[in-house]
Image (cartoon, helix red, strand yellow):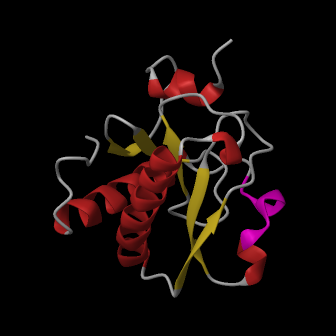
């Protein structure tokens, strides 16, 4: 059975994409720890991060850095957080989010029922920052 992330990637369920390329996608999580919380996900279903091809992992981290810089700019964040938790969904994903304190890194504190309009707004802010950074080719519509 496909993971929930594969269903999002395949368009079976909606997602707020900010990045798409042949190897990876990035979309907003539905349970953000802060506004602008993005997941960077390989298109291929890989459960454990230590099993991913090193080239794919390098690409994922490059995408995470690019999306992280745009998110930092879009939200005027003092720092950007990055986590690989891997317990919520059996499909490798990198959490990238504006970080304001160490408490921000606690995924158990994520918002359970965020306003869909706020998520839409956050996605558009990140897309605009990616376009401004010259990443229009990979910026999702």
> Looking at the image, which residue is at 63% across and 51% down?
114
Q: Is residue 30 left or right of residue 121?
A: right
Q: Nearer the viewer, residue 122 or 85?
A: 85
Report the number of numbered marks. Answer: 0
Q: Is residue 62 above or below residue 92?
A: below
The image quadrant that residue 101 belongs to is: bottom right
**Residue 97 picture quarter:** bottom right
Please identify the quadrant where the C terminus is shown.
top left
Q: Quarter holding the N terminus?
A: top right
Instruction: Point out the residue furthest to the top here.
Output: 1
Residue 54: x, y in percent?
Answer: 52, 49
Q: Can residue 105 be seen?
A: yes
| Point 49% across, 51% down: residue | 119
Residue under the image location 78 percent in, 77 percent down: 103
Task: Name the side, left or right, on which 101 lies relative to 45.
Answer: right
Task: Report the front residue among 16 and 86.
Answer: 86
Specify start and end residues of the magenta stretch as a single range.
105-111
Q: Position of residue 96 (x, y in %)?
A: 55, 62
């Amino acid at each position: 059975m496909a993971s929930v992330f594969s269903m999002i990637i395949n368009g079976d369920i909606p997602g707020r994409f900010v990045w798409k390329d042949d190897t990876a996608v990035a979309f907003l999580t539905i349970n953000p720890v802060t506004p602008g919380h993005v997941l960077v996900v390989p298109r291929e279903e890989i459960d454990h991060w230590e099993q991913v091809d090193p080239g794919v992992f390098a690409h994922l981290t490059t995408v995470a850095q690019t999306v992280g810089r745009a998110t930092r700019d879009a939200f005027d964040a003092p720092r950007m957080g990055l986590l690989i938790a891997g317990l919520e969904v059996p499909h490798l994903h990198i959490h990238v989010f504006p970080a304001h304190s160490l408490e921000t890194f606690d995924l158990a504190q994520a918002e359970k029922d965020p306003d869909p309009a706020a998520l839409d707004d956050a996605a558009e802010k990140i897309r605009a920052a990616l376009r401004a950074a010259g990443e229009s080719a990979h910026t999702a519509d």
